[in-house]
Image: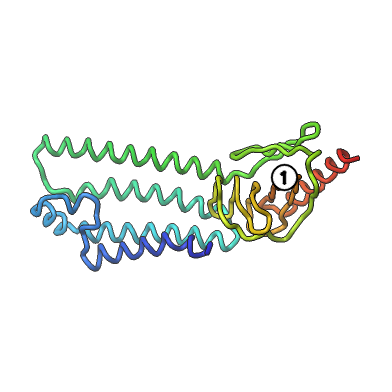
Amino acid sequence: MEILIDWMAVIIILVLGVMIKYLKMHWLIAGYNTSPAEDRRAMSEKGIGGFIGNGLFVLAAVLALGNLGKYLGYPMAQLVSWMLFIVVIGYIMIKAQRFAPEKSNHDSASSRKAAGLTIAITVVVFGVVAVGIIGGNRESTVEFAADQVKIRGIYSTQIDLGQVTDIRLEDSIPAIKSRTNGYAFGDTLKGNFLLQDLGKGKLYIHSRKGPFLYVMTNQSYVIMNYRDPNQTRELYERLWERWDQEVQ
């Protein structure tokens, strides 16, 4: 399922590229179908279909390279590919303006202003998304304070050591049934999830490979790991030592 999700966007973009460039389905291009027939003919003659089709192929290639990098053991490759994806979209939007039909100076100025506003809004939206992805993929930090353990970052939480019933390392986690309120991108899972057999709890997963640190409490659980397995083991040892002191 995870592989299907990773490649779904690539497949859809590739199919759209083929439809626009080779099958001449130019009506799929935003703004083309609502333009007058004369303007549509002018844009087609200038080669808008080939340009947009090639742009979509580049976008698909960017996402595909990010997926391949992820599978080769570089989790940040997918994040970088999405950032580059945004840059390419901006380039396509700017360069696509040259296919617009010739208009009067007044109409041309108005068109440029409208295009500039659209691009600016798009850049802001994608910028916010990029910041969210960068923040979400940042590894969670753990702080020890008195009889509590605090996990910092998005979906932060704190664990009362007096409520802990078990701390252990496992090589895997149960199947995820649903994300009730959390973040999921690439190998990163943060927030509230529903797991098979364990029910509702919190995940702070930065690698789909073990080990995974399980902190079981009276009412729920927290499962966490880092991209570096040794860092996960070190946290386990520190947490076990603190818990052992608390229960004694």
* Image x and y of residue 218, in percent: 76, 45
* Residue at the (30%, 50%) spot, across then down: 92
Q: Which residue is mark 1?
A: 219
Q: Is residue 132 left or right of residue 140?
A: left
Decide if residue 204 is in sight here.
no
* Residue at the (74%, 51%) spot, across then down: 214
Q: Residue furthest right?
A: 248
Q: Is residue 204 left or right of residue 39?
A: right
Q: Nearer the viewer, residue 34 or 63?
A: 34
* Image x and y of residue 242, in percent: 83, 40
Q: Tag 1, which secondary structure?
A: loop
Q: Residue furthest bottom?
A: 23
* Image x and y of residue 145, in percent: 77, 32
Q: Is residue 94 above or below residue 55?
A: above
Q: Quadrant of the C terminus?
A: top right
- Amino acid bearing label 1: Gln
Q: Nearer the viewer, residue 245 or 3?
A: 245
Q: Is residue 66 left or right of residue 158?
A: left
Q: Nearer the viewer, residue 237 or 148?
A: 148
